[in-house]
Image (spheres, rainbow, N blue to C red):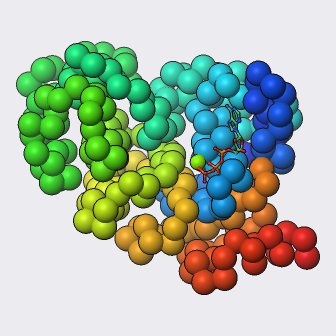
């Protein structure tokens, strides 16, 4: 079998400040181009996992490893991880007053490419991506996340995804705060980005509800509980969870 794109082995991580362990031995493998969904109750460690993958300084890895294309990324800074092709949707959740989305994206793209993109090429690229995502061009002139609604923030993330074309996209809570139409647009956006992608983009989708998975079909579904992945399966696992609830998953863990 080919080397997985991302391989998480017995990952233990704690809150750097307090030493509280949150991730207690996570194992997960994602192959190139695969769509994985992680589900699990509140506080099970899903967001922590995505932050640890991104190299968030609030967490310390105490055991295990994260391999990207077979190489440990634990020693890499967050921007080096981004450069390697790992994209985190919440990576820039902060409001950046005064910096337009267009300027922000251009800087991010230049940093990823390691060279300046021609301003006209950039405009063309952005226009075509916004069209693909059914976004109003005016949106690009707004400041990053400044007064954005939940749905607008998510659309902005999808636009980043379309522009930066990562190898692995980690999307946390992509469905939270989205009304049903926005949910469809975002799901369709991810699907379109994936289709148009030159290389096959892998996606790690963190979600509470099966709802979003009606629009994006995962190849694998994982259930996270208590800082561990306690069960993995196909798309049908999400349906089973929706039906039977996380109590069922808890019982499985104990069984
Ligand atoms: N920086 C932090 N400081 C204090 N506690 C933290 C920190 N990060 C995570 N935790 C705690 O770790 C646990 C897991 O949090 P995490 O955000 O990963 O859960 P989650 O699975 O994403 O939950 P949700 O479904 O509610 O988003 C929670 O109890 C949370 O309070
Ligand atoms: Mg979370």
Count the labels in the image. Answer: 0
Residue 162's place in the image compared with 91, above or below, is below
Residue 123's place in the image compared with 231, above or below, is above
Q: Position of residue 60 (x, y in %)?
A: 76, 27
Q: Give whichever of 177, 185 is nearer the camera.
A: 177
Residue at the spot 10% in from the left edge and 45% down from the top edge: 136
Q: Give whichever of 57, 71 is nearer the camera.
A: 57
Which residue is farthest right? 255
- Give left or right: position of 244 versus 248: left
User: Is residue 8 something one can see in this rendering?
Assistant: yes
Residue at the spot 44% in from the left edge and 41% down from the top edge: 89
Residue at the spot 55% in from the left edge and 55% down from the top edge: 206
Quadrant of the image containing the C terminus: bottom right
Residue 42's place in the image compared with 84, above or below, is below
User: Is residue 105 something one can see in this rendering?
Assistant: no
Residue 98's place in the image compared with 48, above or below, is above
Q: Give whichever of 113, 45 is nearer the camera.
A: 45
Q: Position of residue 241 (x, y in %)?
A: 63, 77
Q: Give whichever of 81, 205 is nearer the camera.
A: 205
The picture quadrant where one finds residue 69 is top right
Q: Position of residue 36 (x, y in %)?
A: 56, 60
Q: Position of residue 83 (x, y in %)?
A: 48, 26
The picture quadrant where one finds residue 246 is bottom right
């Amino acid at each position: 079998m080919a080397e997985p794109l991302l391989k998480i082995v017995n990952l233990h991580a704690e809150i750097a400040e307090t030493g509280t362990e949150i991730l207690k031995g996570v194992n997960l493998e994602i192959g190139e181009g695969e769509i994985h969904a992680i589900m699990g109750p509140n506080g099970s460690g899903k967001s922590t996992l995505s932050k640890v993958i991104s190299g968030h300084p609030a967490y310390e890895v105490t055991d295990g490893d994260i391999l990207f294309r077979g190489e440990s990324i634990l020693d890499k800074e967050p921007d080096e991880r981004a450069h390697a092709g790992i994209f985190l949707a919440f990576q820039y959740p902060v409001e950046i007053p005064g910096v337009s989305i267009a300027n922000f994206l251009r800087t991010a793209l230049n940093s990823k490419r390691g060279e300046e993109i021609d301003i006209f090429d950039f405009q063309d690229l952005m226009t075509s991506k916004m069209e693909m995502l059914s976004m109003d061009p005016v949106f690009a002139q707004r400041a990053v996340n400044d007064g954005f609604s939940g749905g607008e923030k998510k659309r902005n993330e999808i636009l980043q995804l379309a522009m930066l074309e990562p190898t692995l996209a980690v999307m946390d809570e992509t469905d939270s705060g989205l009304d049903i139409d926005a949910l469809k647009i975002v799901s369709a956006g991810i699907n379109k980005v994936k289709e148009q992608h030159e290389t096959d983009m892998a996606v790690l989708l963190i979600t509470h509800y099966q709802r979003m998975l009606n629009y994006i079909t995962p190849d694998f579904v994982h259930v996270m509980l208590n800082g561990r992945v306690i069960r993995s399966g196909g798309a049908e696992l999400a349906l089973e969870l929706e039906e039977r609830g996380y109590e069922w998953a808890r019982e499985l863990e104990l069984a």
